[in-house]
């Protein structure tokens, strides 16, 4: 998966190595090759994209921070001239105007390229509740993508958009980020106008962004945030600066983990806490139980009636158009017959929880697993309610308690199974959220595939160890590469991609991102770093041989790896 980020795209535009039209053509090719992932409802098409390409001619890249940057839009957010379906064909309407957020992005030079698939009416955290197909996980297609902003997250992870808009009421802008190894930023409720989006719970809804990097997330945030006078839920929050919190908070009791990979997720969480300990800030524990009590009020109390108030009439008039599980959730407030008194009691209880949370979290940032596990799409089909409920264990409280949050990658539970954490701060302390994310990501690692002298037990293993790298797992490449013994001093392997390639043994190491540049400076010509595809279909950074006709070499591909070649050559 060749992912995009805003800075590199702008550099490519400035250097003339690609044009916006060429980039859109490349994206449409990727969309066609990933059609089975069910990412899109309205696919990228020049029929509606061309006018935005033409408008770029009147915009100065120097004054438009998102000039030529392609973005995807969850299909409950309006894009003028394209249907908004909210993943329900019978609900579809032609959007006459852009939503406020989409318009602000376009004004900054961004190119809207299509509408993405989602859990119907944004009711779900799994990405499977759509008549347009179940969205597949970007890394392991048999697993869920997370939802409800499913297609948006996978579009970014699969390199089909530089960033994408989602929405978030109970975690829909964070769960898909974690499951697809990208960033999901959910600003404070009201900081981004929601006018022009289909409401789930209007008083709690947020429009969110998925990106491949922290800088991109906050660049988009700076473009779109700000009061909009005709949006009754809009609030004035300043653009976040960077401020370090006084401390990190983690739950006193270890979080609950679930699913086939529960033990792997537990270990990944423990590793994330160890990484947190390297950040140089105090870490304190807190009682998380009342957060869970607040979370339960979102669907097991009268709060769910807000969803019915917006969509109930449509559900009653089109009962066969709604997924059964979606209908059950939307109608639960009627079935349980909550009265006005119960609504006020819940509001008062939530206010007490909010005050308690804000007192505890003053000058602090809470870190939690974004998800406690994941599921196969088959498992979700068999148990649609319980599996979905588990995905929201550590997300549902956020908007109810008026918090901002950012979901960020935090390593892997196992090979090609990303693990993510979410940082939380109160709505008035978004500066701390940004600062905490930067601190945590300073200790970020990136996977690096090595074939030869950097493998365990070989001469250059110490280079990786001295830079803080750690062995992660043994793997095998896709059958697309050949290996040569280079007659250099010392002798080393050189790997090239080719059509008649074989499978090669590799080791995947995690190297601190901050030390990657130092490591690259140690790599002698003719070796370099490129993208290497593993047998499971994932792509990682790895050594690539820049073929130099002046270097003598022997083809040793038949041995399937450097270690075996050393024993048999």
Image (tube, helix red, strand yellow):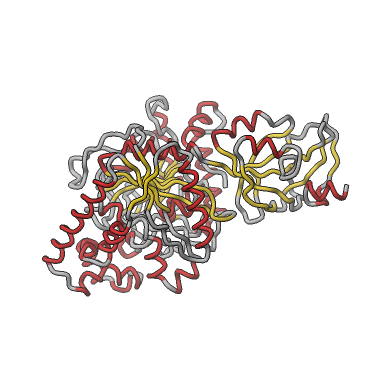
Residue 192 picture quarter: top left
- Give above or below for 543 relative to 382: above
Residue 246 picture quarter: top left
Residue 321, image x, y percentages: 33, 70
Residue at point 67%, 52% (across, down)? 474
Residue 515, image x, y percentages: 58, 33
- Give above or below for 234 relative to 134: above
Residue at point 76%, 38% (across, down)? 459
Q: Is 530 positioned to the left or the right of 125 in the image?
A: right
Residue 460 picture quarter: top right
The answer to whether residue 216 shows anywhere in this view is no
Q: Is 523 positioned to the left or the right of 217 in the image?
A: right
Residue at the limit of the structure toward the right, as seen here? 569
**Is 234 or 396 nearer to us in this picture?**
396
**Is 14 or 523 nearer to us in this picture?**
523
**Is 498 or 21 nearer to us in this picture?**
498
Residue 171, image x, y percentages: 35, 55
The answer to whether residue 214 shows anywhere in this view is yes
Q: How many marks?
A: 0
Q: Is 42 positioned to the left or the right of 451 in the image?
A: left
Residue 67, image x, y percentages: 42, 32
């Amino acid at each position: 998966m060749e992912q995009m980020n805003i800075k590199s795209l702008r550099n490519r535009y400035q250097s003339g190595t690609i044009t916006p039209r060429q980039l859109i053509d490349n994206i449409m090719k990727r969309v066609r090759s990933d059609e089975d992932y069910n990412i899109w409802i309205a696919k990228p098409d020049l029929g509606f994209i061309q006018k935005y390409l033409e408008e770029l001619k009147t915009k100065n890249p120097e004054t438009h921070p998102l000039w030529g940057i392609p973005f995807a839009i969850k299909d409950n957010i309006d894009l003028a001239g394209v249907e908004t379906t909210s993943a329900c064909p019978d609900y579809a309407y032609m959007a006459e105007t852009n939503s406020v957020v989409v318009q602000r992005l376009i004004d900054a030079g961004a190119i809207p390229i299509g509408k993405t698939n989602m859990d119907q009416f944004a009711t779900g955290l799994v990405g499977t509740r759509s008549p347009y197909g179940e969205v597949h996980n970007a890394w392991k297609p048999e697993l869920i993508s997370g939802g409800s902003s499913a297609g948006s997250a996978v579009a970014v992870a699969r390199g089909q958009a530089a960033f994408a808009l989602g929405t978030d009421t109970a975690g829909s802008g964070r769960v898909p980020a974690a499951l697809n190894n990208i960033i999901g930023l959910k600003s404070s409720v009201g900081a981004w106008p929601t006018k022009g989006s289909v409401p789930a719970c209007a008083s709690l809804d947020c429009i969110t962004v998925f990106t491949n990097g922290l800088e991109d997330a906050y660049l988009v945030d700076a473009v779109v945030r700000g009061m909009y006078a005709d949006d009754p839920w809009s609030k004035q929050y300043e653009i976040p600066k960077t401020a370090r919190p006084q401390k990190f908070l983690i739950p006193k009791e270890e979080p609950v983990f679930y699913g086939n990979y529960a033990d792997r997720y537990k270990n990944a969480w423990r590793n994330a806490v160890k990484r947190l300990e390297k950040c140089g800030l105090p870490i304190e524990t807190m009682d998380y139980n009342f957060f869970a009590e607040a979370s339960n009020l979102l669907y097991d109390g009268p709060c769910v009636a807000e969803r019915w108030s917006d969509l109930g009439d449509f559900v009653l008039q089109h009962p066969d158009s709604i997924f059964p599980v979606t209908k059950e959730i939307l109608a639960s407030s009627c079935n349980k017959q909550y009265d006005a008194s119960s609504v006020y009691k819940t509001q008062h209880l939530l206010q007490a929880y909010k005050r308690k949370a804000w007192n505890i979290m003053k000058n602090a940032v809470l870190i939690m697993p974004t998800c406690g596990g994941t599921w196969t799409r088959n498992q979700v089909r068999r148990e649609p309610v319980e599996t979905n409920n588990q995905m929201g264990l550590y997300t549902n409280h956020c908007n109810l308690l008026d918090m901002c949050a950012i979901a960020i990658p935090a390593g892997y539970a196992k090979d090609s199974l990303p693990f993510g954490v979410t940082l939380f701060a109160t709505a008035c302390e978004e500066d701390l959220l940004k600062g905490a994310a930067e601190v945590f990501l300073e200790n970020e690692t990136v996977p690096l595939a090595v074939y030869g002298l950097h493998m365990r037990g070989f001469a250059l293993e110490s280079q990786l160890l001295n830079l803080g790298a750690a062995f992660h797992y043994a793997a095998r490449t896709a059958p697309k590469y050949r290996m040569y013994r280079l007659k250099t001093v010392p002798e080393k392997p050189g790997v090239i991609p080719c059509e008649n390639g074989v499978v090669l043994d590799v080791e995947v190491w995690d190297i601190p991102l901050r030390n990657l540049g130092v490591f690259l400076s140690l790599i002698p010509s003719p070796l370099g770093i490129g993208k290497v595809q593993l047998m499971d279909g994932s792509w990682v950074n790895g050594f690539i041989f820049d073929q130099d006709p002046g270097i003598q070499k022997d083809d040793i591909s038949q041995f399937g790896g450097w270690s075996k070649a050393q024993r048999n050559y």
